[in-house]
Amino acid sequence: MIGKILLLLAACCILPPAFAQSIDISNGGQQPPHPADLILNISIDETQNRAPAGIVVEISSDYSFVSRNAPTDHESLQTDNSGTVTFHTLTGPHEIRITGDGIAESTRTIEIMQQQSRDVETIVVMSKLASGQYSVAKEGTSGVISAASINIPSKAEKEFQAGSKALKKKDYDAAKKHFSSATGIYGKYSLAYNGMGVAQMALGDARAARASFEKSVQIDDRFAEGYRNLARLSLADHNFEEMDALLTKSLLSESLNAWALTYAAYAELQLHNFGAAIAHARAAHGVPHPGLASVHIVAAKALEATNQPDDALKEYHLYLDEDPNGRDSARARQTIESAEKAKNN
């Protein structure tokens, strides 16, 4: 769900003169764009795990014509069986948007330089788990109560409840208004700031959401849900160091939260902090963790990296026990079968 890894880009081909003359060049007197092939290899969660066929990749450009085959500034293709799409485009900046079943939407900007004629990039997107959505904490969900939460005025609490109901109805503008009213009445209402952040995320305003989540944990430095929501933003940015630090803080007050344990392990795997990844993954397995069977894949990878193949195989078996038809099931079975063949030879 769980970083944005960039590799190289490039492109090639000769533009027909008639098409070249039709381009609306608005790059301030710079060299006109020339044809380039943009090849995007899409992976999920990690570079070696190529996306399946059918993931939608869209590009848009500042120029009048992006594709030599489609006279438009916007083009959409689907990945093939190897997780690849190829756009015949022009040099210059391109906005990339990647969507599909089971993945979190990913966007980025890619600029193909004038000297390039063939650009290749690997983009890693995050898998999307139902349990990984931004969430609103409720009164009493944490075992720790901050001093700021004790004397919440009744009017502010009513506005918070109204905002929470609006979120459930997906009326995010109304939710923002109610949460804003709640914080206007009581400026130390951490739950309301967190709710505001959730509404802002739903409206696509990640910057404002980050500020709201940060305000919630500034008011209450034991507010685990605020840290988890900030960690989700870090996950979207593939900032694994920040993500791990935030989840570590969240676990100080809610040490048995399965999502935090799972994604702390994932972040630590990316950071090559294998010992911590194994510890957090095993802690996650020790509590109910529906929808988070992938924690065993994380544990297996960390164990493999530390030369513990037998324990890694146990994690693959646990994964298959919990999610036999999951996205990583084929890879888990293949690893187990390969290990069994090696023992028999």
Image: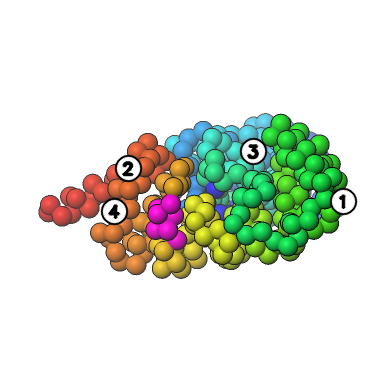
Give how far apart the Cα atoms at labels 2 and 3 are: 37 Å
Crowd tier of the residue under label 3, counting other residues whose Cα lies within 10 Å: few below 14, some 14–19, many 20 or above: some
- Residue at disc 4, secondary structure: helix
Give how far apart the Cα atoms at labels 2 and 1 are: 50 Å
- In this figure, which residue is indicated by the disc labeled 2? 321
- Residue at disc 2, secondary structure: helix
Give how far apart the Cα atoms at labels 2 and 4 are: 10 Å
Marks 3 and 1, the one that precedes in the sequence: 3
Crowd tier of the residue under label 4, counting other residues whose Cα lies within 10 Å: few below 14, some 14–19, many 20 or above: some
* Residue 40, above or below 3: above
- In this figure, which residue is indicated by the disc labeled 1? 185
The spot of residue 177 in percent (x, y) is: 84, 41
The spot of residue 57 in percent (x, y) is: 60, 39
Tag 3 and tag 4, C-beta contact below 8 Å: no
Marks 3 and 4, the one that precedes in the sequence: 3
Is residue 64 in the magenta section? no
Tell me if I can see residue 85 in this picture: no
Residue at x 31%, y 57% (from the top left corner): 312
Give how far apart the Cα atoms at labels 4 and 1 are: 54 Å
- In this figure, which residue is indicated by the disc labeled 4? 314
